Image: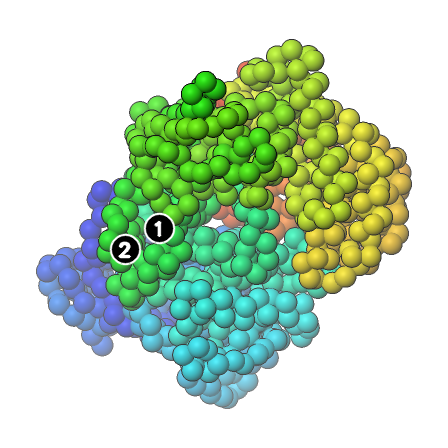
């Protein structure tokens, strides 16, 4: 039945907990069908006379004791959301012991204790621990943990929990137990256990503080070979955090466990991280270059949480971006330091513009720190993570590296072992640097993406050049106040050299740029002989929409003279975006006339040709430039989204460019072949990225010849996927044979099959819906496995515009119907699929008319509170 709408939780209503738990002793008697959990809680009443209320859901209560005495039935009461212990009222301290039964095998929500294959695993963030035992389930209740796991040795030979292992015992009758102790006070959302038949890869090292540390990556079964890359990534992350932030690991063991069934990407539980298998298992036969890069990034992210999230945790869930936005920024730094700073920035901004900007402008927009929520699971969003990381990056830009590091040291020192707030974070940076940066908190309270309009004035007689920078509120938040925006920029003279900073301005100076605080700022240069070329928002210093009208020739010139790799890429993307929008019938200043539009497209083609001909250009950078703005980026740039027109414009431009540059593309594929044959070093990955970007274009004009050659020669999963995608998405000869061969070889590997299914689901044609419906009706469909759902339905809804936006509405009805089905299995997975409808208010009238019946049908059926909350925010 439809879950009753929960009352709104409001940031303004925060109160400290009435009862605090200082120490926890858990004893698990583990079984797949049923497990029993005994919890002994040392409690302290901080509000005299307050009732002792513990959260708990789907728990079968077996026993309750208070201070060693069994309680009578009238001394406590249980309801659907928890346990109230009436007998504790008036006590200052007490010890409560409960025993409950939970059913892991039936837990398809994958929250709390659940079964995955032959393993028993847990997932407790955000509110999953209440499905394991009764507890004050909120992040500002931090306790020390002692966990004992008991189980049948044959079925569960490995018993892992958070902290360090302190004892192992044989219990007789084929049973055994392991005891784990986490001495660091942590909230219950960081609790974890893993039990079952597992093998590991392992290494030992000595931390910078002299601590001996064992690193283990565990996987179900007896073949852990595909965990080795992830193990190396753990060590790289540990050493990087020591060097970059001075943060040392604080336990004797760091365990990682692989989960085939996992709703999220990974979880940073104290001492026992649990990872979605797609972010651990990898070798060159079964994983792509993109997989390896993602594994290193996600491993880093979860490891870095040990300080930014675990040692310093959250006061409440409204502060979620304090750990997630900060840690995303740290994992971005990690990847940039190990590889290419420019390429990492391009990757991050591409995601931000294509998805987060759209989220911030759509029906599901919300501030980084919302003022209220009804279901916290719905706020694990790109806004909280990616935009939150951009706000931290702006602070770093504003202060500079040394001052930012001083602020981080102060933050960790002041808040170690505490439940912190965003105010605590910015207070620490202000105290450490003597610079008041608390105005940055405004970024957390406002939804939408600010617009920075740039007006240019040049007086050739006086040699004076003026830039007027005007900040406008987001269209969906018209009353928003100006935000502090750090801006990096450059001006170039006719000779291609960077000019000096402005002679006069009314902004605040920061390292390498200016801080814009007001609605309008003016920058002036004098003594210039020629009209200069401006480059704004270098390195994407601020997550804003820059409106700077430039000619096609000017944008092409930026690619030639600018030293910042991101700005060069951005200039080309902006030119491509304008051409695409104009071809789709949108009004683009300066491109209304056909000859002007043709000239702009020619300038774009010329710039691409120059990059392809430049043997010294970084191959991965050229590959990024060949990846033109995608559908989501185009949709975000128009006031009314006509899916058919946008898809047609993009396909048409790509086809014309491929025809013009066919020979150059083929030459680049051929010359990069030796370098691409290497392993996992950056040079080999870069060569493959350009070869496969070139293949995507070539396959539009060569009948699939290059794709079939690559398929025949492929030695790695990266090459196989590139060739297979080109054949299938192009509907080219050889696709059926390639699909059959691929499926035959990898049918037993669920992660590899997910790649195959995603390729089928994203074939860019309206009739791909028929294929996707067949997949859901076929043997590969597994609604209880989030990876499989994302590979088929998520990929279809998010990455197949021609099929999802079919004129007859069938794509919308398909996704809406599956949301209803999946909601009974895993409400979090179901709710996330609704994100595909976030742009509905800006869809064309025809698309809205086709989509609304799918949402209306969903509103008429039983649904969880996860889905119900998002439906309430979508247009009716």
Which residue appears at 48% of the width and 61% of the height? 302
Q: Quadrant of residue 705?
A: top right
Name the side, left or right, on which 510 lies relative to 654.
left
Residue 330 in picture, x, y percent from top left = 45, 56
Work out which residue is located at the far top of the displayed protein and give it: 593
Which residue appears at 89% of the width and 38% of the height? 733
Identify the element where label 2 is drawn: helix
User: What residue is pinned by disc 1?
Assistant: 399
User: What residue is pinned by disc 2?
Assistant: 433
Crowding near the residue tagged with mark 1, few <14, some 14–19, many ≥20 C-alpha atoms within 10 Å: many
Crowding near the residue tagged with mark 2, few <14, some 14–19, many ≥20 C-alpha atoms within 10 Å: some
Residue 743 in picture, x, y percent from top left = 80, 52
Q: Quadrant of residue 479?
A: top left
Picture layout, residue 849 above or below residue 364: above
Observer-nearest residue: 80 or 134?
A: 134
Residue 120 in picture, x, y percent from top left = 53, 67
Spatial separation of the CA atoms under disc 1 and disc 2: 8 Å
What colouring method underlies this structural image?
A: rainbow
Q: Earlier in the sequence, mark 1 or mark 2?
A: 1
Do labels 1 and 2 touch, CB within 8 Å? yes
Q: Quadrant of residue 614?
A: top right
Residue 623 in picture, x, y percent from top left = 69, 43
Report the disc number at residue 130.
none
Picture layout, residue 837 above or below residue 70: above
Which residue appears at 40% of the width and 79% of the height? 209
Observer-nearest residue: 672 or 107?
A: 672
Residue 819 visible somewhere in the drawing: no
* Quarter of the image with the C terminus in it: top left
Which residue appears at 55% of the width and 52% of the height? 341
* Quarter of the image with the N terminus in it: top left
Picture layout, residue 750 above or below residue 559: below
């Amino acid at each position: 039945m439809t879950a009753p709408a929960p009352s709104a939780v409001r940031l303004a209503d925060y109160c400290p907990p009435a009862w605090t738990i200082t120490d926890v002793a858990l004893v698990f008697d583990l079984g797949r069908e049923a497990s029993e959990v005994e919890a002994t809680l040392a409690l302290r009443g901080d509000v005299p006379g307050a009732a002792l209320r513990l959260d708990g859901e789907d728990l079968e209560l077996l026993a309750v004791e208070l201070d060693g005495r069994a309680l009578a039935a009238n001394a406590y009461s249980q309801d659907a959301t928890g346990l109230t212990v009436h007998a504790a009222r008036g006590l200052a301290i007490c010890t409560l012991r409960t025993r409950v039964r939970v059913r892991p095998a039936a837990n398809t929500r994958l929250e709390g204790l659940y079964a995955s294959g032959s393993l028993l695993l847990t997932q407790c963030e955000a509110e999953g621990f209440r499905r394991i035992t009764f507890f004050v389930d909120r992040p500002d209740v931090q306790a020390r943990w002692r966990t004992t796991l008991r189980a049948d040795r044959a079925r569960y030979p490995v018993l892992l929990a958070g902290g360090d292992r302190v004892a192992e015992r044989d219990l007789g009758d084929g049973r055994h137990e392991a005891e784990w102790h986490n001495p660091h006070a942590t909230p219950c959302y960081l609790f974890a256990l893993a039990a079952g038949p597992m093998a590991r890869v392992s290494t030992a090292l000595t931390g910078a503080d002299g601590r001996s540390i064992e690193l283990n990556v565990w996987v179900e079964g007896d073949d852990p070979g595909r965990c080795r890359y992830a193990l190396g990534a753990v060590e790289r992350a540990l050493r990087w955090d020591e060097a970059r932030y001075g943060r040392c690991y604080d336990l004797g063991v760091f365990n990682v466990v692989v989960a085939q069934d996992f709703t999220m990407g990974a979880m940073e539980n104290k001492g026992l991280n649990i990872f979605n298998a797609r972010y651990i298992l990898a070798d060159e036969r079964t994983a792509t270059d993109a997989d390896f890069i993602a594994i290193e990034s996600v491993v880093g992210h979860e490891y870095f949480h040990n300080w930014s999230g675990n040692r310093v945790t959250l006061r409440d869930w409204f502060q979620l971006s304090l750990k997630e936005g900060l840690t995303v920024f740290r994992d971005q730094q990690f990847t940039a330091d190990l590889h290419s700073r420019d390429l990492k920035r391009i990757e991050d901004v591409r995601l931000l513009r294509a998805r987060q900007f759209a989220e911030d402008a759509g029906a599901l927009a919300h501030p980084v720190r919302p003022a209220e929520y009804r279901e916290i699971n719905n706020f694990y969003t790109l806004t909280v993570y990616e935009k939150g990381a951009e706000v931290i990056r702006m602070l770093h830009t504003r202060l500079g590296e040394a001052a930012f590091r001083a602020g981080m040291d102060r933050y960790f020192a002041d808040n170690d072992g505490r439940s912190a707030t965003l105010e605590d974070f910015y207070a620490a940076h202000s105290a450490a640097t003597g610079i008041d940066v608390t105005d940055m908190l405004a970024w957390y309270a406002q939804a939408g993406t600010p617009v920075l309009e740039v007006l240019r004035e040049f007086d050739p007689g006086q040699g004076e050049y003026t830039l007027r920078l005007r900040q406008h509120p987001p269209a969906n938040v018209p009353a928003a106040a100006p935000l502090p925006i750090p801006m990096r920029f450059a001006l170039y003279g006719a000779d291609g050299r960077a000019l000096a900073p402005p002679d006069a301005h009314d902004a605040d100076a920061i390292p390498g740029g200016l801080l814009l605080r007001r609605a309008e700022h003016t920058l002036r240069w004098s003594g210039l002989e020629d009209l200069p070329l401006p480059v704004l928002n270098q390195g994407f210093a601020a997550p804003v929409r820059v409106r700077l009208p430039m000619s096609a020739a000017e944008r092409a010139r930026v690619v030639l003279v600018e030293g910042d790799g991101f700005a060069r890429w951005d200039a080309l993307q902006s030119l491509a975006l304008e051409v695409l929008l104009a071809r789709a019938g949108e009004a683009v200043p300066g491109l209304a006339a056909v000859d002007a539009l043709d000239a702009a497209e020619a300038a774009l083609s010329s710039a691409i040709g120059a990059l392809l001909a430049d043997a010294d250009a970084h191959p991965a950078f050229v590959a990024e430039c060949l990846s033109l703005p995608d559908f989501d980026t185009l949709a975000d740039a128009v006031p009314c989204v006509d899916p058919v027109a946008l898809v047609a414009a993009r396909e048409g431009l790509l086809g014309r460019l491929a025809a013009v540059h066919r020979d150059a593309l083929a030459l680049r594929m051929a010359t990069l072949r030796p370098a691409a044959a290497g392993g996992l070093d950056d040079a080999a990955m870069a060569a493959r990225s350009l070869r496969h970007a070139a293949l995507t274009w070539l396959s539009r004009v060569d009948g699939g010849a290059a794709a079939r050659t690559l398929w025949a020669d492929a030695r790695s999963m990266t090459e196989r996927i590139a060739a297979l995608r080109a054949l299938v998405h192009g509907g080219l000869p050889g696709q059926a044979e390639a699909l059959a061969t691929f499926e035959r070889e990898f049918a037993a590997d669920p992660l590899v099959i997910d790649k195959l299914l995603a390729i089928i689901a994203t074939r860019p044609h309206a009739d791909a819906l028929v294929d996707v419906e067949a997949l859901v009706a076929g043997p590969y469909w597994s609604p209880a496995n989030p990876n499989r759902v994302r590979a088929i339905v998520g990929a279809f809804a998010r990455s197949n515009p021609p099929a999802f936006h079919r004129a007859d509405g069938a794509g919308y009805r398909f996704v809406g119907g599956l949301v209803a089905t999946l909601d009974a299995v895993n409400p979090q997975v179901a709710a996330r699929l609704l994100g595909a409808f976030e742009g509905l208010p800006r869809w064309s009238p025809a698309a809205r008319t086709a989509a609304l019946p799918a949402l209306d049908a969903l509103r008429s059926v039983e649904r969880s509170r996860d889905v119900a909350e998002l439906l309430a925010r979508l247009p009716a």
